[in-house]
Amino acid sequence: MRWEVKSGLWQLVGVWGVLLATWLPALGAFEWAVSGPRAAALGGAGAALRGDQWCSARNPALVVAQPSGVAASWSQQFGLPELAREVFTVGGRIRSQYLAIHGSNFGGDLYREGELGIALGWSVRPELSAGVELAGRWLDIRGYSSGRALAVAAGIVIQPVDPVELAAVWRNLNEPRINGYQDRIRESLTVGLAVAVQPVGTLVADFVQEEYFPTEYRLGAEIPLLPDIALRVGARAEPVRPTAGFQVEIGRWSFAYAGDLHPDLGPSHEVGLELRLPR
């Protein structure tokens, strides 16, 4: 992939991203967590949202509720080919252990970052599940040193009453340091809520607190139009970015699209394909 700059604005954005990742990797690198197109269409919310192939990547405790199967997605931020990202996930149950693996690749020849993570989950009680995630991350910037890091995350999901789900996810608990850089990847806490309102749909909300930054709010609603078609809308504040998307299911296959609109940088898009396997 070639690094192409089409305007002075995009050149400024590209230089800004490389400088952040070079001098402030805690702010620039690994900024976008894997969430999948379903959560992306719901304003990025989904820490307590179960049932899709990406739920364990959002919260390792949800691996116990992840359908057996595989999924892949492709996204592009703000219409820039240099900000494309490819992600895959595979999950299921091996004997009595729930586990899922996900990987991602972001960037181009000038700047590239990747991640490979494994999530393990346990059903502690019918209303309580817990999980941990270990993720190896790598960062390569042309002309600068490459870096590696191992990040640890933990999560819980509680169902106090049906149909309410509460969740919490702690990321970068070990405050990993990228080799070759002094700064550490900052720790974050996400508190999530999901409420299934039948037959209307599902409402979700996440509150994300990262070190040195104000709380970010993410809200979304999922509405089943037909048994095999779902519509999703949402918003996130960073600044306010409206989101929308849909999903179509055909047998064990499903196709999803998500888009959001940044008020200054323009639209972003994500598409995903899932395949559910028999348990």
Image (spheres, grey):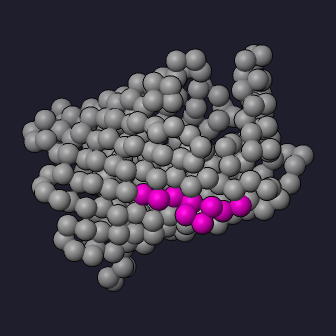
Q: Position of residue 32 (x, y in %)?
A: 56, 44
Q: Position of residue 206 (x, y in %)?
A: 37, 43
Q: Residue drawn at (45%, 45%), measured in percent from left and top?
A: 208
Q: Check the image and report above or below for 273 versus 97.
A: above
Q: Residue drawn at (41%, 36%), measured in percent from left and top?
A: 217
Is residue 66 visible in the rendered image? The answer is no
Q: Is residue 173 magenta?
A: yes
Q: Position of residue 125 (x, y in %)?
A: 22, 74
Which quarter of the figure has residue 14? top right
Q: Residue drawn at (27%, 76%), measured in percent from left and top?
A: 124
Q: Magenta segment, principal secondary structure?
A: loop
Q: Is residue 119 magenta?
A: no
Which quarter of the figure has residue 121? bottom left
In what quadrant of the picture does the N terminus appear? Answer: top right
Q: Check the image and report above or below for 167 versus 15.
A: below
Q: Position of residue 70 (x, y in %)?
A: 42, 59
Instruction: Give the camera-side residue of 212 and 279.
Output: 212
Tell me how many marks there are: 0
Q: Is residue 12 left or right of residue 57?
A: right
Instruction: Give the camera-side residue of 258 and 204.
Output: 204
Q: Is residue 252 left or right of residue 197?
A: right
Instruction: Give the camera-side residue of 240 and 35.
Output: 240
Is residue 160 visible in the rendered image? The answer is yes
Which residue appears farthest toward the left when viewing the image?
Answer: 199
Q: Which residues are magenta?
A: 169-177
Q: Check the image and report above or below for 7 versus 234.
A: above
In what quadrant of the picture does the C terminus appear? Answer: bottom left
